[in-house]
Each structure stands twice: as structure tokens, then as C-alpha cells.
Image (spheres, rainbow, N blue to C red):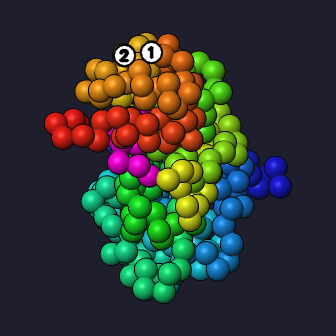
């Protein structure tokens, strides 16, 4: 197996080396066969899979032999040519030349949408579009009936290690990892890091390590959605160095001390110490003391 993986790794490396990666697209191609296999281990023969950013197709080539159906969305013109050449012969493969942020899942999985069939997503994405893509796939926390989220079973996501730590963080996390991305990722799902990935697993070699993250979608949110929940959460993290009282006052909330006292929170606590359930309780109290004519 090690000999086979070495051959695959050399093949991936040579193919990646021939391709001129584009920094503006954040292209770093996964060339470690063991990590590719780790991604594939989450796929079953009856799975419908969306791959975001297939690049040169190293993961895709394994997906098409492991899944029932694979749809790959790629933005880069040059990568599209390679994918068409190497994977065009697979009947269970569909290639879409577009930006994933401009696509609604129901438009490319119409049959699955009509039947309620869930899909799985595999994605290797650059840091700068991590949050927009997660928001696009999961919806904002107050989007109860987001269609994209309703179609997804789980997402296997390759991101920079520091971003992975932020995705899975909660209020107990160290080093200020917990924030808006954490709540966005976990409000409608459960998250976990399934494998750390060394930077030399990619070509070109990036400056930092990465990690594979599993985002398992739930049918229900972590808490009930109140009218002020989203605004409360955003206010708490807008100025992280401020305590929750000042953060809420700066966001335009009134009667903040009364709301904090009713919810049982110290006036000096910072937003990064509040769980999703804590934000729910606080938003309820804020709504009680702000839901008056002339209030926010």
C-alpha cells in the first residue's frame, strides 16, 4: 500500500507541477494520497456528492469510482479543460463551470430536491471564501427554511488549520478562536476536525497547515430563533475587547443592564464567553426590554 501511495503521490505531484496555480484563486492542490483516501472514506457507493473546487481532479478521480453520482463545480478555465479531458468519460460525473456562490443546490440537484434526497459535499477551499461558502451552504442563523441546507447531509471541508479551529470552537475555546464563524457553522450543525493535514500535502506548498473538518447538518437549530438573536450575536463579536454591556449599547440596544440581569449575566462578561444557548436567553431578555415603539 505504501508503494502504491508513493506512486500516486509522485503522479499527483508531477501533474500539479505542470499546472500554473493561480494565487488569486487560492489554488493549492492536495497531492497526499492518504488524505485523499481519508476524504473518500466518508463516501458510500449510494451517495450523491457535490465537489466544490475539484482543481486538477485528484479527489474527483476517486469520488467517481466510490459514489453513485458526482457533480463538480469549478471556476478556473484551465482546470476545467483538464477535468473534461480526464473525467469526461464517466457517466456518473457532471462538471459545472461556475462560481459555487452563484449556484443554488436545487438548480443542479433538481431530482434530489424533488425527492428529498440528501447530498454530501467535499470541498478544498481557500481561506478568503470560507465564511461566504459556509453561509451559502448553511444559510444565516435566522434562515429557518434555507433550501441549500435542507439538501445537505454533511460537508467534508478542507481549510487552513487556524480556520478549522475557529469552525469547531465553542465558548470554552482558548486563544479567541470562538466567534461568528463558530456560531454560523454550529447553529444548524455539529462540527469536528477529523484530520490535521501538513502543508507539504499540497502543491504549491502553502505557508500554513490545514485540516479536514466534518460539518454534520441537523434538522433543528441549536436553539429557538428570536427576533434579536442574530443582532445580539453580531453585536457581541463586533468589538471583541469590549464587555457585553458596552457591545450591546454600541449596537443600539436599550435597557441593556436590565436585560443582562434578567438573563443572569455579569455586566463585564465578554461575548466570547457566551454559548449559543446563552445568546438565546440574552436575546429574549433584550427583546423584552427593547420591543417598544421607537426602540430598535
21 or 293: which is nearer to us? 293
Q: Are marks 1 and 2 in contact (CB under 8 Å)?
A: yes
* Residue drawn at 40 percent across, 66 percent down: 145
Q: Which residue is mark 1?
A: 243
228 or 294: which is nearer to us? 294
Residue 217 vertical placement versus 232 (above, below): below
Q: Is residue 245 left or right of residue 215?
A: left
Q: Is residue 209 left or right of residue 184?
A: right
Q: Does the rendering let one see residue 157?
A: no
Image coordinates of residue 206 in percent, x first then y, are: 50, 30
Residue range (magenta): 225-233
Mark 1 surroundings: few (<14), some (14-19) or many (≥20) residues within 10 A = some
Residue 205 vertical placement versus 12 (above, below): above
Question: Which of the 4 image quarters holds residue 238?
Answer: top left
Image coordinates of residue 24 in percent, x first then y, are: 31, 37
Q: Which residue is mark 2?
A: 246
For label 1, the SS is: loop
Mark 2 surroundings: few (<14), some (14-19) or many (≥20) residues within 10 A = many
Amino acid at each position: 500500500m505504501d508503494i502504491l501511495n508513493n506512486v500516486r503521490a509522485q503522479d499527483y505531484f508531477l501533474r500539479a507541477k505542470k499546472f500554473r496555480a493561480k494565487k488569486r484563486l487560492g489554488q493549492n492542490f492536495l497531492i497526499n494520497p492518504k488524505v485523499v483516501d481519508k476524504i473518500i472514506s466518508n463516501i458510500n457507493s449510494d451517495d450523491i456528492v457535490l465537489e466544490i473546487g475539484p482543481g486538477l481532479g485528484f479527489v474527483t478521480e476517486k469520488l467517481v469510482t466510490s459514489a453513485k453520482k458526482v457533480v463538480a463545480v469549478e471556476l478556473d478555465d484551465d482546470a476545467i479543460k483538464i477535468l473534461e479531458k480526464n473525467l469526461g468519460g464517466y457517466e456518473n460525473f457532471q462538471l459545472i463551470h461556475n462560481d459555487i456562490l452563484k449556484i443554488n443546490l436545487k438548480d443542479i440537484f433538481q431530482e434530489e430536491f424533488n425527492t428529498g434526497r440528501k447530498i454530501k459535499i467535499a470541498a478544498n477551499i481557500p481561506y478568503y471564501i470560507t465564511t461566504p461558502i459556509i453561509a451559502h451552504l448553511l444559510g444565516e442563523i435566522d434562515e429557518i427554511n434555507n433550501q441549500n441546507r435542507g439538501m445537505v447531509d454533511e460537508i467534508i471541508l478542507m481549510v487552513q488549520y487556524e480556520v478549522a479551529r475557529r469552525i469547531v470552537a465553542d465558548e470554552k475555546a482558548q486563544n479567541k478562536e470562538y466567534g461568528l464563524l463558530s456560531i454560523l457553522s454550529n447553529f444548524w450543525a455539529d462540527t469536528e476536525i477529523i484530520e490535521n493535514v501538513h502543508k507539504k500535502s499540497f502543491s504549491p506548498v502553502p505557508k500554513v497547515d490545514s485540516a479536514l473538518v466534518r460539518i454534520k447538518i441537523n434538522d433543528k437549530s441549536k436553539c429557538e430563533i428570536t427576533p434579536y438573536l442574530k443582532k445580539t450575536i453580531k453585536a457581541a463579536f463586533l468589538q471583541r475587547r469590549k464587555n457585553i454591556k458596552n457591545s450591546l449599547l454600541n449596537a443600539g440596544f436599550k435597557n441593556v443592564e436590565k436585560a443582562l440581569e434578567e438573563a443572569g449575566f455579569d455586566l463585564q462578561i465578554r461575548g466570547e464567553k457566551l454559548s449559543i444557548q446563552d445568546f438565546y436567553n440574552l436575546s429574549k431578555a433584550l427583546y423584552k426590554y427593547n420591543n417598544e415603539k421607537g426602540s430598535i
